C-alpha cells in the first residue's frame, strides 16, 4: 500500500499541476479609432483623449506580456466625407480586434445637408466593420457629444445645436439598433459643462481629459468583452 501511495505522488508531481505550469502565450491586440476632433483629442494632451485612455485602461486588465497597438485616423474639422477619404488614402489593414467610430459633429457644424450624413454614415460603419476582421461585434459606435453646453457652443447656437445633434444621434441610435451594432451614448458627455468647468478643455469647446475618462468608463467593459472573445 505504501508503494502505491508513493507512486500516486510521483505521477501527480508531473501531471496534476500541469495547468499551473503552462507557459502564458502573449497576445497582441490591435485597436483602431476613427473620427474627428473628439477622437483626435483636440484641446487636450496627446495621451489625454479617449483612444489612448481606453488603450491604457485595457492594458491593466490583461497579462503584462500582452501588447496593444493603437492607430488613430482622425482630424479636427473632419466631416463624414473627409473621414471616408482619409480611410481610403491610409488603407489600413483589416485585422483590427477593436474599431471605434465617432463622427458627425462637423456635418452639423458646417451646415451640411442631413441627407449627406445618411449616405456617408452607413458607408463608414461598413468600412469600420471590414477593418474589424469583418465582424460587426468588434465595432463600437459612439454618439456625438453635444457641444452646446460650452462657452463656444452658447455663443454659436446654444439649444439649436442640441436640437440638431439630437437628430443626428437619433439616427445613429436607430441605425445601431436596426443593424445590431454596439453603441455607447456620449451626447451628454459634457452636458454639465457650463456649471462644471472640469469637463471642458482649455479651448472652451472640446471635452477635457476628465470628460474623456468618463467616456472610457462607459467604453471599457464593452471593449474588454470584445477583446476577450
Image (cartoon, rainbow, N blue to C red):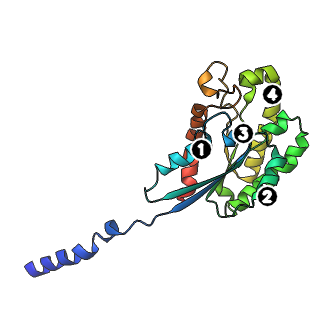
Q: Tell me the distance, in whole angstroms, between the alpha carbons under discs 3 and 1.
A: 18 Å
Q: Tell me the distance, in whole angstroms, between the alpha carbons under discs 1 and 2.
A: 28 Å
Q: Going 79% across and 49% down the picture, which residue do you hit?
A: 83
Element assignment for label 2? helix
Q: Tell me the distance, in whole angstroms, between the alpha carbons under discs 2 and 4.
A: 31 Å
Give coordinates of residue 180: x percent, y percent. Answer: 71, 52
Element assignment for label 4? helix
Q: Residue 191, located in which quarter of the rendered image?
A: top right
Q: Tell me the distance, in whole angstroms, between the alpha carbons under discs 1 and 4.
A: 25 Å
Evaluate if marks 1 and 2 touch, with contact meaning CB atoms under 8 Å apart: no
Q: Earlier in the sequence, mark 3 or mark 4?
A: 3
Is 221 displayed left or right of 85 in the figure? Answer: left
Evaluate if marks 3 and 1 touch, with contact meaning CB atoms under 8 Å apart: no
Q: Residue furthest left?
A: 2
From the viewer's side, name the closer residue of 115 and 177: 115
Q: From the image, which quarter does the C terminus lie in?
A: bottom right
Q: Which label is found at residue 37?
A: 3
Task: Please name the residue that numbered disc 1 is placed on.
Answer: 219
Task: Please name the residue that numbered disc 4 is placed on.
Answer: 161
Task: Please name the residue that numbered disc 2 is placed on.
Answer: 89
Local packing at callout 4 (Cα closer than 10 Å; few below 14, some 14-19, many 20+) is some
Give coordinates of residue 16: x percent, y percent. Answer: 27, 71
From the viewer's side, name the closer residue of 49 and 8: 49
Local packing at callout 1 (Cα closer than 10 Å; few below 14, some 14-19, many 20+) is many
Amino acid at each position: 500500500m505504501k508503494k502505491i501511495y508513493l507512486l500516486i505522488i510521483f505521477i501527480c508531481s508531473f501531471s496534476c499541476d500541469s495547468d499551473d505550469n503552462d507557459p502564458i502565450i502573449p497576445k497582441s491586440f490591435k485597436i483602431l479609432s476613427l473620427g474627428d476632433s473628439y477622437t483626435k483629442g483636440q484641446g487636450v494632451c496627446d495621451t489625454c483623449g479617449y483612444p489612448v485612455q481606453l488603450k491604457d485602461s485595457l492594458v491593466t486588465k490583461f497579462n503584462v506580456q500582452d501588447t496593444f497597438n493603437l492607430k488613430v485616423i482622425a482630424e479636427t474639422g473632419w466631416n463624414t466625407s473627409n473621414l471616408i477619404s482619409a480611410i481610403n488614402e491610409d488603407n489600413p489593414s483589416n485585422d483590427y480586434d477593436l474599431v471605434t467610430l465617432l463622427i458627425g459633429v462637423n456635418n452639423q457644424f458646417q451646415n451640411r445637408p442631413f441627407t449627406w450624413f445618411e449616405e456617408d454614415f452607413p458607408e463608414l460603419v461598413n468600412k469600420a466593420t471590414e477593418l474589424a476582421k469583418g465582424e460587426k461585434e468588434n465595432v463600437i459606435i459612439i454618439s456625438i457629444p453635444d457641444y452646446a453646453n460650452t462657452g463656444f457652443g452658447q455663443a454659436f447656437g446654444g439649444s439649436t445645436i442640441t436640437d440638431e445633434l439630437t437628430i443626428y444621434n437619433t439616427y445613429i441610435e436607430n441605425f445601431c439598433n436596426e443593424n445590431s451594432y454596439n453603441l455607447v451614448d456620449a451626447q451628454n458627455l459634457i452636458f454639465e459643462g457650463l456649471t462644471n468647468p472640469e469637463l471642458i478643455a482649455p479651448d472652451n469647446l472640446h471635452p477635457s481629459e476628465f470628460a474623456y475618462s468618463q467616456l472610457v468608463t462607459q467604453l471599457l467593459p464593452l471593449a474588454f468583452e470584445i477583446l476577450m472573445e
